[in-house]
Amino acid sequence: MVDVVHRRTSQGVPEMFAQSSTVLIYWWSLVVVHFWASWAQQCLQMNEVMTELSKEYPHVIFVKLEAESVPEVSEKYDISSVPTFLFFKNCQRIDRVDGARAPDLTKKVQQHSETTKQDLNEQLGKLLNSAPCMLFMKGTPQEPRCGFSKKIVEILNEHNIHFCSFDILSDEDVRQGLKVYSNWPTYPQLYVNGELVGGLDIVKELAETGELEKTCHKEMRLEERLKALINKSKVVLFMKGNKALAKCGFSRTIVGILNETGVEYETFDILEDEEVRQGLKKFSNWPTYPQLYVNGELIGGLDIVKELEKSGELLSTLKGENAS
């Protein structure tokens, strides 16, 4: 269980943790935050309950946050007494328990953790199908962080096979969940059209027998890649960074606006793929980022999203209700 005490801040809980050096929140996880006070005996008792729950639900992140040390945050989430428990998932608050109600806390943890597991499987399915050839590895193709990952990247590049990658070191939920999802205990893992091909040994064997190109197909045309990416989810945001950690002010602002709507959306980090970064500008005739797409159609950048928010049309646009 993580114990976090922050200086006074006007940030919300997700933003606080996204920028914290003491805890890394995996955004597909269920996060339970205990607003507590050291002088309250009930809080100490509920801390013991949380400790036991953390053993029973290891994939749930339990956090202790001293309410009086972050008054602005406590006010933002209407924390008027301790103990209070808030539930977060995908950067959004989804539930709460007020008071030392151990049975209610236990029940809600169980309910939401089951939903989170289902959501993770859905997210894994989307990841596997986010590109025709998908490599789950340690690090990136430019900077592999283990010998096996480095070798498989070399083989794929030698055979001119275009692939996208996911750094499993960046998300422990994906790292552990994919092992169970595909019944394959090690990394790297290569997928084609959402189906597991295997790890380094199998890729080596396919390369030696001349079957690798047939298995992975030749490099997909950029236009086809871009069409697949903008349609990988109903709402897709191409940005610098991701929704948990934006890497420019424009991207950070648009993420904040979208999060306020409560609509689910996927992100693509253009800093990790220069081909997509440059190609999408021409494909959509839109020279800057971030870029927001709904049902495969370009909505626009930050200024347009701000206009839609101001006019009250943003939510209906994200739901695809404004399509002509």
Image (cartoon, helix red, strand yellow):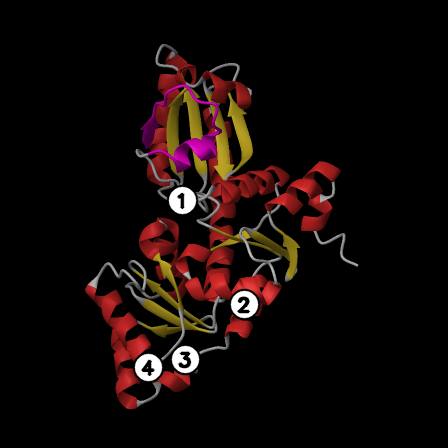
Q: Are marks 2 and 1 in contact (CB under 8 Å)?
A: no
In this picture, which residue range is highlighted in magenta?
Answer: 1-20
* Few, some or many residues within 10 Å of mark 3 (<14, 14–19, 20+): many
Amino acid type assigned to the residue bearing label 3 in the image: Cys
- Image mark for residue 159: 4
Check the image and name the residue furthest to the bottom: 209
Q: Are marks 1 and 4 in contact (CB under 8 Å)?
A: no
Residue 193, horizontal then vertical, whole percent: 48, 74
Amino acid type assigned to the residue bearing label 1 in the image: Tyr
The local secondary structure at tag 2 comes to: helix
- Image mark for residue 121: none
Residue 218, horizontal then vertical, whole percent: 43, 82
Observer-side mark, 1 or 4, equals 4
Name the residue beneath numbered marker 2: 226
Name the residue beneath numbered marker 1: 26
Sooner in the amino-acid sequence: mark 2 or mark 4: 4
Residue 209, horizontal then vertical, whole percent: 29, 89
Name the residue beneath numbered marker 3: 216
Q: Are marks 3 and 4 in contact (CB under 8 Å)?
A: yes
